[in-house]
Amino acid sequence: MSTYATRKATNWIMLGLCGLCAITATVALIAILSYTIAKGAPAINLQFLTSLPQPVGETGGGISNAILGTLLLVGLACVIGIPVGLLAGIYLSEFGGHRFGSVVRFTADVLFGVPSIVIGMFVYALVVIRMGSFSALSGGIALAFIMMPIIARTAEESLRLVPTTIREAGLALGIPLWRTILSIVLPGALTGVVTGIMLGMARVAGETAPLLFTAFGNRLGFQGLDNPVAALPLQIYRYAISPYSDWQSQAWGAALVLIALVLITSVVVRILTRKRR
Amino acid sequence: MIKSSPLPTGVTVPVRDEERKVSNGGVQEGLVSIGLNAWYGRLLAIRNINIHFEPKHVTAIIGPSGCGKSTLIRCFNRLHETVPGARVSGQVLLDGKDIYSPGTDPVQLRRRIGMVFQRPNPFPTMSIFDNVATGIKLNGGMKGSRLAEIVERSLRHAALWDEVKDKLRNTGTDLSGGQQQRLCIARALAVEPEVLLMDEPCSALDPIATMKIEDLIRSLRETYMIVIVTHNMQQAARVSDFTGFMLAAEDRAGELIEFGPTPQMFTNPKDKRTEDYITGRFG
């Protein structure tokens, strides 16, 4: 039999447990960030950001190839992934009420759950073998495959939040359906759509596994879309497992740069889209 | 006010059609439905509606909830068919032409038949100006001063200009509910329709805002054919020239029970069910 006092005690205990869990989750993030800053910040200077890697044994050298490579790969992934993902999201939300729609939705969810290394292998078989070499292009395609379902599903969800009456108001004015969707519904869902794009970009910017079989990495600068290209996660991976302490500290520096890049992009995009409203 | 010419009563419209066509040089003015049925999936929502709306008159559709009033007027701008699974049979003639004929583009039709919805629904991301201008702009219309002129005229028409003229760049959703509804009316007027369908335009508004909208309806009557769906019988009595009374049958399909000049409908209804509804015996 529970008295008022025991119920009150249970309440406090459960509340305490919830609070503890919330703190644990936040502590993990703060720990990662502060540890990366502490270990990575000393490695960062202008030369680190602007020069190419040096051979083992020589001091100095930087990660400009990897920064450029990551920007290129994420850019390629966006060029392919955003239009496809966004249009798929619009299709699912506006026209996907039937059987085919639910098949597409299910497929997107499965693709979202496919381990990224499998996508890397798939693109290796699809693109790399046919082109005859590792390439920036194949890396961008692999990352686009990872991005598409994220963008499609978040775009769909945020478009659905726009009330039907807004669509009907557009149609009732004699505005064609495509125009109504593009100029009235989409702006209403812009914040959510942009969040989806940012989530997709952040996710692929940190992907290592699919790039092992596609972009492969190199120690030179940009060599063309049909040649291997470096990427920050690849560089971090190779430097971090190397036995040289110089490279290991550069790996921390590169990790910090990667986090900063993702953070800066998402802040800039947020500011830009907020002004448009 | 009330025309002395013979008035169409719902059931006999098809016959009168023929008479009018002869007398009117082949074209019947106004909006006419003949044997109109509408379904949501398998559910028949309205059955065999025969009704005639005249230009420059206000017609009110009254009836209890779920009797198909909204469905009926959504058939007149072909918005009903945009709901998945919904379909329509029968004829709707606008100035003698069937709006459900295969050659009719619903997008073009909706420019001629405007609509105001139950809840104010200004476009949330747009300014007051853009809300009104959108219908013209997105139809590949004009820009600049000509557009500004139309926006001002529409807002004046909707009796909202004086309240918003200094804040046209603010978002439409910042306005009060009654102002938002008048903004939606201005938005509908901007594309210069011939008919204005109003689906319970005051049900989400307070009495003062309702009064303003009713004044507006009376002034718009000079220019437009107005069809207003309402729950509020006093409102129908105040603003309309003709009234139609709808009721759901046993199978939940809405039927037009009686149609006539508003004073007659409220003082001397022919049908027992109309009398019961109007005197508040049910509904």
Image (tube, grey):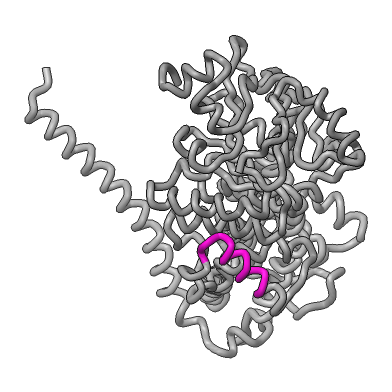
In the rendered view, tell whether residue B235 sits above or below residue A260. Answer: above
Q: Residue at x 72, y 35 (%)?
A: B5
The quadrant of the picture occupied by the C terminus of chain B is top left
**A9 or B45: nearer the viewer:** B45
In the displayed structure image, the side of residue A134 where residue A219 appears, left or right: left
- Is residue B196 shown to the viewer in this render? yes
Q: Main secondary structure of the magenta part?
A: helix
Q: Nearer the viewer, residue A118 or A185?
A: A185
- The image quadrant that residue B80 belongs to is top right
Residue B154 on the magenta span:
yes
Figure disc tally: 0
Q: Residue at x 55, y 50 (%)?
A: B218
Expressed as whole percent of the image width and height from the top left, the position of residue A1 reads 11, 17
**Residue B122 point in image, percent of width and height:** 55, 56
Question: Residue A115, position in %: x, y?
Answer: 66, 45
Give left or right: position of B115 versus B96.
left
Q: Is residue A87 visible?
A: no
The N terminus of chain B appears in which quarter of the rendering? top right
* A28 lies above or below B87: below
> Which of the pair A54/A46 is nearer the observer?
A46
Q: Position of residue B54 (x, y in %)?
A: 71, 40
Q: Quadrant of residue A243?
A: bottom right
Residue furthest to the bottom in view is: A46
- Magenta residues, as a range? B148-160
Q: Residue at x 61, y 56 (%)?
A: A193
Q: Verify whether residue A147 appears in magenta.
A: no
Work out whether B26 lies above or below B129. above
Residue at point 64%, 22% (across, down): B256
| In-image side of B183 versus B37 (left or right) | left
Q: Nearer the viewer, residue B267 or A151?
A: B267
